[in-house]
Amino acid sequence: MPYLSLIVMVIWVLCLIDVVCADTYAVRHLPKVAWVFVVLLLPLVGSLLWIGIGRPEGARFGGASTRGPAPTTAFPEYERPGRQLATNSAADEEFLRRCRERAEAQRRTYREQQRRADDA
């Protein structure tokens, strides 16, 4: 029986760390801040409630989930590995050539407008 308080304290500390490390969007039934208060104020009952109904589904202790890392932006398609790599170098060269031509045409137009403004 003397180890019961030690076991409760270990469970309480692990659950408190788990609540703090859990992803805010994945916590169930209550906001994350409310879970922190429940686990802090009711060590044994709050910890058991967190384990039973509050933890994100598929989560491991320490905040890691089995679904992989959470997206860091609102557009996860931009986080695909290798997205920034060129796939068709000929099309890229053509695109860059057209961009340069368009930029040069805009510079010529600007110079002509400046000459007309200076002459007037």
Image (spheres, rainbow, N blue to C red):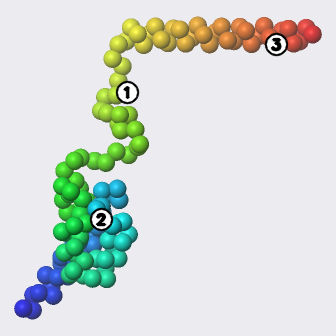
Image position, residue 28 (x, y; %): 28, 62
Mark closer to the chain start, 2 or 1: 2
Above or below, 94 relative to 84: above
Residue in the picture at 76% in, 10% down: 111
Local packing at callout 2 (Cα closer than 10 Å; few below 14, some 14-19, many 20+) is few
- The reply, left or right, for residue 94 in relation to residue 69 is right
Q: What is the three-letter code of the residue carrying label 3?
A: Gln
Image position, residue 71 (x, y; %): 34, 45
Q: What is the three-letter code of the residue carrying label 2?
A: His
Above or below, 97 relative to 6: above
Q: Nearer the viewer, mark 2 or mark 1?
A: 2
Residue receiving disc 2: 29
Q: Quadrant of the N terminus?
A: bottom left
Say which mark, if any, is on residue 114. 3
- The reply, left or right, for residue 103 in relation to residue 91 is right
Q: Nearer the viewer, residue 95 or 48?
A: 48
**Tally of marks:** 3
